[in-house]
Amino acid sequence: MSGVVVHLPRGSGGTDGGAPCGDPVTLRLGPGEVARFGRGSATVPVELRLDDAAISRLAGEIRVTDDHWQLTNHSSTHSYLVENPEGAGEYLRVAPRRVGAPIPFEFSRVVLPTRGDVPVSFQVFAPDHVYLDPEAMGVPWGNHTVTAYSLDETATYFLVLVALCEPRLRDQSRVAVPTTPQIVERLRSHPACGALTARAVSSHIDYLADEKLRIGVPDGPAEHGKGERRNGKREEVVGLALRFGLVREEHLALLPPLTGARGRERQAER
Amino acid sequence: MTPPLGLGGTTECDRTDLLPPGYRVGGWVVTGLIGSGGWSTVYAARPAGARSAGGRPVGARSVGTPAGTGPGPAEVALKIMPTAALAPRQARRIVESARREVELGRRLGHPRLIGFLDTFVLSAPDRPSLDGAIVLVMERAAASLREFVDAGVPEADRGRLIAEICEGLSHLHRSGWVHADLKPENVLLGADRSVKLSDFGLATELTGTHGYAPPMGTLDYLPPERWRAPLGELGVLVRPTADIWALGVVIHEVFTSGGSPFTGATPVARGAAVQEYGAGRAPLRLDHALPPFWRDLAADCLAPTHAARAPHTADSLLARIRAARQETPVTRTAPGAGRRHGGRARAAVLATALCGIAGAALCADGVRAAGSYAPPGRTGVATGAVRVFNAERGCQERAERDPQCSLGLAIDPRKPYAAQNVVATRVWHGDVLAAECELADGRPIIDEEDRQSTRWFRVRLPAGSAPSAAWLPAVRTKDRPSLPGCPHPAAAP
């Protein structure tokens, strides 16, 4: 648990005073820390600068509380939307002048209205949500020993993780971890995640490695190619998830059924 | 009491899995349920047969037997960890946890660790869900520190319990192990209320300066660095300073009926507060119920980083506690024993109650600074002068006038020695006060070392103070000047 990550995509603004306009921005906030967002100015500094004339100098504020975050809307006229990109249309409307609205989503997209067709938006990740261990259900949990790296078993990243672990879970042998195209193919018939792109799969794996499991970055030489590093990362994610029981046999049920043809094909591959 | 190692259990059927009293497990007969957690269920049991020598395996470590028993334990605790009906990966984690407990139990016997007697695999063909379960046979404890803490630990027991936890940690750390899940639930108390650390399911043997534990823990006891710790191939890195942090939390709980040093309504909120403190964005705010010595000790245990905590080893903490407690004989007889149960009710008259009222210190006008009214000098305190003595050792060594170490002077020595009966002027260890007269039958005061006295000295306050004099309890000085008796005060003089 280490706070939230705010990500502003390329072309929407920048950090105040610092980076050239248009570069993507990533902010990490620990518990109790605050980031202000808006158009900003010399007298109204903001941590997250959003370039749009329709956005106030100080449009709002993000504050990290416990394992989630709160949104304060400094606009006196506009509501802000907080969407859950994984929630099949789940969203919250934060009314004008609302202070400290708690945001329950692990993944959020904060959407600010503009005069144009394209609203300005940025993402906030809250990877610290705590989940009970399966057998701790139904008992007071406050003093219980819990797994410190808990995963949302309904999230897309978990589905990707199960797909990554599937070959080893099925036959318990040390076969290669599936590649990104193999994951995309494996999840294609999934009712909700069938349209997952290779890029999305890669960012889910990065999120798992960097924010959820916080895989230690080895002090290895920098001459490794990027692809090689990514492969190492994916091996490591699978190894840890299996070793510490974060993914278990029962989770295979989350994956679409292996169709006969593909099942045979997979068998043939080995 | 409940070993709450949670993972991999099948909750939906565990109620029907409970063993009835009289059920035989190896050489033992179940007498009752103690508790159950995610991974395991713990039963009380007695040896099968009058003297079941067969039940005690060869090579079992002899442990401190409960009071009033013969050579073998009359009662044991059986920790039963079922593995049937679990997928291989789940079972492996339970086996791993049991392995840690067994290894530590076999190698590290100590009076401050719960005694480990035996382990075997349960053969119970009549109960398929328990067939093949791992059984750990352990010394039976009478209670856990959690029950004690929730009820309010009696004043007289606090220091001893903390010292004994420290003894257990010291032994573990010297032997190269980290407990990794220290909390009041895992501090068991024997029939004689002596401390027995237990639940070594996450305990880790160090290689060099650190070891790796499974990525599990109890949120309220995790040090700040654990919240950001990466997960490595072997688990998460643990060092003895993690136990020291947990010890700091436990010390705080012992003095505050279970209150955490970090504010928040939930463990997650308190975890966030721990991180804010660890990142230097919030100060440590310890409860004023902690006497100065224990505040200092807890603050050292709760140093925000591993590096800052590292000098405070279990050994060094234990030495400090022993030194502080040695100022008076540790073994007390009648008065100490009597106070065990009435400790909380009498807390109001304890001089401790006046230590560390930070608010009062705001208006404190240093008595020592206004030295004109009292004869200074280290040697030969003049008749009529009394040098303030603070039994808290941490306060004796302090050069600066820490508000936590200040002592109060009473307005009326026959009223309760409490915050509303104290003048604004505070005094510190070593201050020399001018005593005018003494009162033999004031309110009885007991200090941190259990010295008790009804004698009070009326001392002059610096010029301009109102009232012009106040009362120092005789237990707050070692000096016994011969003074005239004070006229019985109608109120403050």
Image (cartoon, coloured by chain):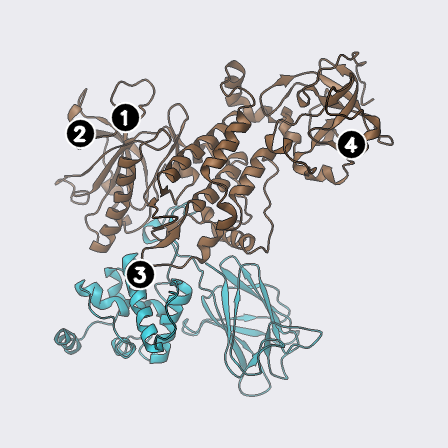
Considering depth in this image, is B13 or A35 the residue closer to the camera? A35
Residue B58 numbered mark, or none = 2
- Alpha-carbon neighbours of circle 1 within 10 Å: few (<14), some, or many (≥20)? many
Q: Pinpoint the chain carrying mark 3.
A: A
- Which residue in the protein does label 1 denote? B75
Q: Which residue is mark 4?
A: B367
- Residues under labels 3 and 2: Cα distance? 39 Å
Percent position of residue B454, x then y: 68, 16
Badge 4 local density, few (<14 within 10 Å), some, or many (20+)? Answer: many
Coordinates of residue A151 in the picture (x, y in percent): 37, 61
Give the x, y percent position of residue B344.
56, 27
What's the chain of the residue with tag 2?
Answer: B
Determine which quarter of the picture holds residue A246. Answer: bottom left
**Mark 4 on the same chain as mark 2:** yes
Chain with colour brown in the figure:
B
Element type at marker 1?
loop
Q: Is residue B269 visible?
A: yes
- Quarter in which the C terminus of chain B is drawn: top right
Residue shown at 27% from the left, 60% from the top: A242
